[in-house]
Image (cartoon, coloured by chain):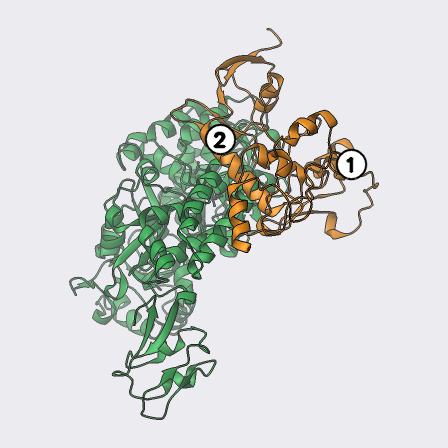
Amino acid sequence: MSKVEAIRSFAELEDLHGVLVERRQGERPRISVCTGTGCVACGATKVVETFKKILDEKGLSDSVELKSTGCHGFCEMGPLVTLGPSGYFYPSVRPGDVQKIIERTVLEGEIVEELLYKDPQTGEKVEHEAEVPFYKHQQRIILAENGHLDPNDLEDFIAIGGYKALAHTLGSMSPDEVVDSVTRSGLAGRGGAGFLTGRKWDIARRQPGEPKYIVCNADEGDPGAYMDRSILEGNPHRVIEGMGIGAYAIGARQGFIYVRHEYPLAVERITKAIDDARSACLLGEEILGTGFSFDLKVVRGAGAFVCGEETALIASLEGHKGEPRQRPPFPAESGFQGKPTIINNVETWANVPHIINNGPDWYAAYGSKDSKGTKIFSLVGKVNNTGLVEVPMGTSIRSIVFDIGGGIPKGKAFKAVQTGGPAGGCLPAELLDLPIDFEALQEAGTIMGSGGLIVMDEDTCMVDVARYFTKFLEEESCGKCYSCRKGTQRMRELLDDICEGRGTMAHLDLLEELGQAVNTASMCGLGQNAATPMLSTLRYFRNEYIEHIKDHNCSAGVCTALIRYKILEDLCDGCAACAKVCPVEAITGEKDQLHVIDIEACVKCGTCLEVCAKDAVVVISGGGE
Amino acid sequence: MSYMNISLTINGLHVDVPEGTSILEAAQTYGINIPTLCHLDGLSSYGACRLCIVEIGPAENPKVVSSCTYRCEEGMEVRTHTKRILDTRKIILELMVCSTPGSKTIQDLASAHGVIQTRFRPENEDCILCGLCVRMCAEQMMAGAIAFAGRGPDRHITTPFDELSELCRHCGGCMHVCPACMYRCMGPKADTTLCSACLNLSPSCVEVYDQQQCWMPPSCGTCVRPEGNYLPATGLIIEEEKATE
Ligand SMILES: Cc1cc2nc3c(=O)[nH]c(=O)nc-3n(C[C@H](O)[C@H](O)[C@H](O)COP(=O)(O)O)c2cc1C
């Protein structure tokens, strides 16, 4: 990895690209280890160190290239290792596997059978990443690059054609043409609202008032969502390039990347990428030797969910309290310091260079009638293959959860999927064939949001889910709108009542009435969807609410006030394992005799159920025995 | 260009206003009464209480906005009292009465909007966080001694770092504009929270109230009932009384 010197013309960029491509031909054997957040959590750092150590020991450090890349998406199976040029793919690599991989695959070109991914459906081993079902059913425009790039290496990015789109824009397109291209591609904002990006740019471009600003929204506060983080961490230059193109289109000289402080790696990578791009004359004064100047600054947010809302984000950028305000005026008319400001999501920015490189028609060919292009979802919860998934808009939920996600673990039944983050709704199994696009989701009573998909199985209590998200929103509401602040508190209290056995049927009517009012009266997207988790579960899972109220039965066995634990007579062998772990000594019994739980003393922590080897401990709810 | 350069309709009525006028101001000018607790002439609009919400746009696909913060736009259609708006205002007022029963302003508004039941657990918060005091202090008294702090359930109004502010001149402007503490309501019992008796009494006290500028006791006193001997204003109260008997 060497520092890229200032590139002062389009020709120089092209030359450098040529040189880098050539240098990469006749490639050395390559080991790429995914060091995205998921893989790092699974031990990728140790794996990289071990590779380095063994390569050193064998004197191979120069002849074999070792690369730490950004997130590949298949986080469930991390750390992921791919080998070049063969393309062999090994998931779940442990430091102990490294020796084998170097000796057999890198040096001999053989496959290490036992390390290959085994398709759980067919039982067959898969040699290459692209053939793994998780990847096979995806359409990866943005995420695919992550796996090839060392995010800290600008040369790597230039070698795959990076900054070509920016050069093309500056060299041969007028700002009008850029806006027109983005408009025709049908690209809609990936941050939630789905507003047409081109149209937004057009508004800002035509606004009087200088200077103009652009902002990248990397606040990403949805629990379980990490697509923006993975792009910033894995491919920061794509975002910078996209922002450069946007700045040229609307006439901005200054941009901000607003990223939450809880993403230290993203902050580090994007900061380094900005420095590198600036030294290479891809950012800053007179970019690529043209008259166009544009610079970027990273601003860290303190991690409030509501600061992802664009007007709150601007307030926070200006140093005020992160609180949304009434639109209009929209930020495109009056944003940062009252000047025209374009805010786009990380993924939106990352799409822009691809649209310029391949043309708007190419982009518009992906997706559904009304929603174009691909979208990244973070697929989490009760699903076999958790990870980041990029599919064309309009792909069915079934395809994402089952073909790509590999279905529900332990053969359990699918119950629901929540889309759109904490303020999104839960969809039931009957809607598995719903295509995911802006219109279809809205009709079904939920939102696209920024792309969170939380899968829930039969062991999930939907009332508890509604309570959980309502509480999240209660805490994350800025508190400005009375309807949102008090409304979320009161909804949560009513849901508490139901979960704890104090619910009445009148609670349901009141919840519905209040929920409608909260969504109607509140000002920003948080308050306008604050009741959506509750309303959607009430719409699709009403019976579960009624069971809680009438029978005091939580059939999923989640709501602690409504369940009790019991030891089954015919299964208990008196091993006393449960009695040993019970934190409140509520379990008694003679050795080798039936053990009994004292219901009064039991705190329902569930530890006994976990340790019982005979499955003799069961959860009972309602009148069940 | 004429001064009244924006034309719109409010509840079907054709209205002309100067550019920059809020929907609330336009409606008030034409005698259309929209309730609000966080707006006061002379202070900037904030949009916190959500009582002044109105529908804008075509009736089949309306948008709901707070009229105090939304400016009139050319050709705009505004509806201030649709069923949806009234229902929503009513439940917001029910929320307010349950949490701030000691404010006569809120009790009266609730009563005027037909709030006859209180279905949420009673609380005794005084502040509704409308922010009038904050704006009064900053914009009229030019002090800026108090502001919002915290978010969600922790949101409150305070001085910087909760210390006595040197900027505060003890002018009392904040108290003067406070809808929660200006007029106290002596009516409600803690277990029902709903008072409204002064407006629900027959003959209604409103008539008296308007004439006498009744700003609470010890004026006419109709509304302050002898303990245990008052006219039940609503079905719900009757039921609750029965239940407690
Ligand atoms: C409560 C709330 C949180 C939001 N959080 C985010 C976020 O984390 N990231 C994001 O890009 N947009 C977020 N948005 C949407 C932004 O307001 C805005 O629509 C978006 O950044 C515009 O970019 P886009 O057009 O590229 O989607 C949020 C909106 C609301 C109401």
The numbered mark at residue B173 is: 1
| Chain rendered green | A
Q: Nearer the viewer, mark 1 or mark 2?
A: 2
**Quarter of the rendering containing residue B166:** top right
Label 2 lies in ligand 1 vicinity (Cβ under 8 Å): no
Q: CA distance from mark 1 to mark 2?
A: 32 Å
Q: Helix, strand, or loop for circle 1? A: helix
Using the image, determine if residue B37 lies above or below residue B194.
above
Q: Is residue B238 left or right of residue A175?
A: right
Query: Can the viewer see residue A280 in this picture?
Result: no
Task: Identify the residue under disc 2.
Answer: B85
Q: Amino acid at mark 1?
A: Gly
Q: Residue at x 55, y 20 (%)?
A: B72
Query: Can the viewer see residue A445 in this picture?
Result: yes
Q: Residue at x 61, y 30 (%)?
A: A338
User: Which shade is chain B?
Assistant: orange
Residue A53 is situated, as x and y percent measured from the top left of the image, at 41, 72
Residue A134 is situated, as x and y percent measured from the top left of the image, at 26, 55
Q: Is residue A584 left or right of residue A51?
A: right
